[in-house]
Amino acid sequence: MGKVLGSVKKYFTAPQEENARTNNFNAMRLIASLMVIYGHMSAIMGMPQHLVLGQKVSSIGVKIFFILSGYFITKSYFNDSNFLRYTIRRVFRIFPALITVTFFCAFIVGPIFTTLPVRNYLTHSATREFLKNILLKVNYNLPGVFENYTYPSAINGSLWSLPVEFSLYFILPLFVVIFKKLKCVRGGILALALISLGCDIYVHSSSEVLRFVVWGSNLPDWATLYTFFFVGSFMSFPEFKKYFNLQLATAFLACAALISLSFTKTEILLVLVLPYFVLSFGLAEKPVFGAWFTKNDYSYGLYLYGFVIQQIVFNNLKQYNLSLNVLTVICFAVTFVFAFLSWHIIEKPSQKLAKKLLDKLKTKEA
């Protein structure tokens, strides 16, 4: 596979500004995490979500994550197309923190908050089913946990997007190899983005398709996230970098926010405007936020722990009638502690271990 992609790899080789982290991408991820937490806070409180660009604020946050994922996964794959090394990098990025949060929910949160006797809870089949989240088989419920909450029984509603994300890690290389043989890599990825957008619009307008759930997530959600992933992937090609301009992107985004359109037109507008803004922000020539997030990326931990922490905090403080904004700040602060620990104890060491494995593989191959 590496031989097939050899002639393309040189265009993606280690851009200095991205390897040095002198950019705003980690700041953009943090903003996306906050958007997801803020949107989920409304749902957990039983309130309608605020809309951004005509869509739920949490949905926009998840789309930002997938734009960035498409952008960086494509660059990563072209930098090193060895499939084993590529897989090791992806597995060590996703699963250590996922395993940890799954065990945290099942064996710490569950026994504390379940209405069942702890022995019955631990031996319950639903507890075993919840552990399948480790294998990306999404399950939101634990026996007797959060049953009477305003948003009942949902332990960690953020997990739904992870199977979609992981599937794209392998769909992208498969299609890139095919497109390389056909000598149409850029055009092929653009075609994938357009096909995904067409499916996105179709499944959202079809009541029949909405019934289908694939690996724990609704089919329309898959189509939406595939669209933004492939747009981010398409915009990762180096020749597009010269067109990114934060001032222009901000102007486009502001104009888009003022327009009220149907779902179809809004989705098309978002596909045109949101990725351009996200990547222009990330690649700004003077990345003022870059120094703040040079070595640490807490966004994944914020995403993984946000929902369960919000469930606990809100339902234990709701007698105080705190506002949405105050609860969001409290939940973000508490979740940040978990994200901090996740990054420094689980995620960062896992990435170091992956790097050691990759170095050994390269040494053996040499």
Image (cartoon, rainbow, N blue to C red):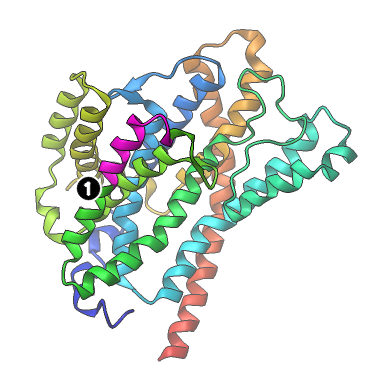
The residues colored magenta run 196-209
- Is 201 in the magenta? yes
Q: Residue at x 83, y 38 (%)?
A: 121
Depth order, front residue of 313/55: 55
Judging by the rendered image, the residue that carries numbered circle 1 is 194
Q: In the rendered view of the protein, which quadrant contains the C terminus?
A: bottom left
**Circle 1 SS class:** helix
Q: Position of residue 272 (x, y in %)?
A: 18, 39
Q: Position of residue 170 (x, y in %)?
A: 41, 63
Q: Is residue 336 above or below residue 327?
A: below
Q: Is most of the magenta stretch helix, strand or loop?
A: helix
Residue 276 appears left or right of 224: left
Can you name the residue that lies furthest to the front here?
A: 208
Depth order, front residue of 14/296: 14
Residue 25 can be seen, yes or no: no
Residue 7 appears left or right of 79: left
Residue 115 appears left or right of 147: right
Q: In the rendered view of the protein, which quadrant contains the N terminus?
A: bottom left
Q: Amino acid at mark 1?
A: Leu
Q: Is residue 90 above or below residue 211?
A: below
Q: Position of residue 210 (x, y in %)?
A: 44, 33
Q: Residue at x 23, y 39 (%)?
A: 271
